[in-house]
Image: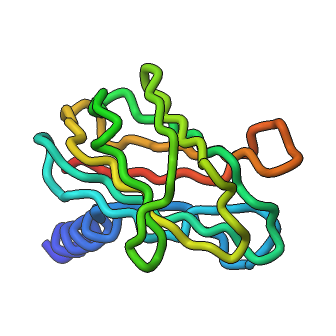
Amino acid sequence: MKRSLIYAVVLTLSSTAIIAPSYASARTDDGRVPHLDGNSQFPPTRWGIFRHTFRLHVPQNSKAVTQLLVKVPDNVTISKNIQDIDVVDEKGQKINTNVSVNGKTILLAFAEPVAPNTKFDIDLNKIKRRNLGNGSVYSFSAREVGIDAEIPIGVAWFRTY
């Protein structure tokens, strides 16, 4: 009887530790590569129309960012209306961005490169999420001034429960 009770408690505690509304990779150093800041926001329900928000940080020692690519998970449908994607700085001011959506990839091309030591939010509005699988991953890449290659900068994933 005690053994069953212990197993039940361990299972309950591990389940609650695993089930959280959002996870994002975040680097603690203020290095040379832009990264997710760990403040991703996902609604905790299985399906519907939502807004997903990601905070990115261009560190002081980094180069300015010219483009950002967001790869969207398979069980998420993004709005084809580019007005449903907002990029705003810490003060809530809109950052001038050319947005294009190609399948499951969002390309954010900044009219003026995002300067180092800047934090900004990407709001994906009117996201439709289907309940397929136990979790989904957004992956982010950036292009910096003077570098033509895509630099992977992090992932953010949400769990459905």
Q: Is residue 50 above or below residue 3?
A: above
Query: Where is residue 90 shown, x and y percent of the image?
Result: 46, 77
Tag count in the figure? Answer: 0
Q: Determine the image quadrant of residue 93.
A: bottom left
Query: Where is residue 108 shown, x and y percent of the image?
Result: 54, 42
Q: Is residue 31 above or below residue 112?
A: below
Q: At 26% across and 47% down in the image, what residue appears?
A: 125
Q: Is residue 76 above or below residue 153?
A: above
Q: Looking at this view, is 65 or 31 the one in front?
A: 65
Q: Looking at this view, is 93 or 149 the one in front?
A: 93
Query: Where is residue 129 shown, x and y percent of the image?
Result: 22, 37
Q: At 49% across and 29% down in the image, what residue appears?
A: 105
Query: Where is residue 136 shown, x and y percent of the image?
Result: 38, 41
Quadrant where the N terminus lies? bottom left
The colour mode here is rainbow
Q: Residue furthest top?
A: 103
Q: Looking at this view, is 142 or 21 the one in front?
A: 142
Q: At 25% across and 69% down in the image, what residue appears?
A: 16
Q: Determine the image quadrant of residue 107.
A: top right
User: Is 49 left, or right, of 79 in this rendering?
Assistant: left
Q: Residue furthest right?
A: 146
Q: At 21% across and 74% down in the image, what residue appears?
A: 9
User: Is 153 left, or right, of 132 in this rendering?
Assistant: right
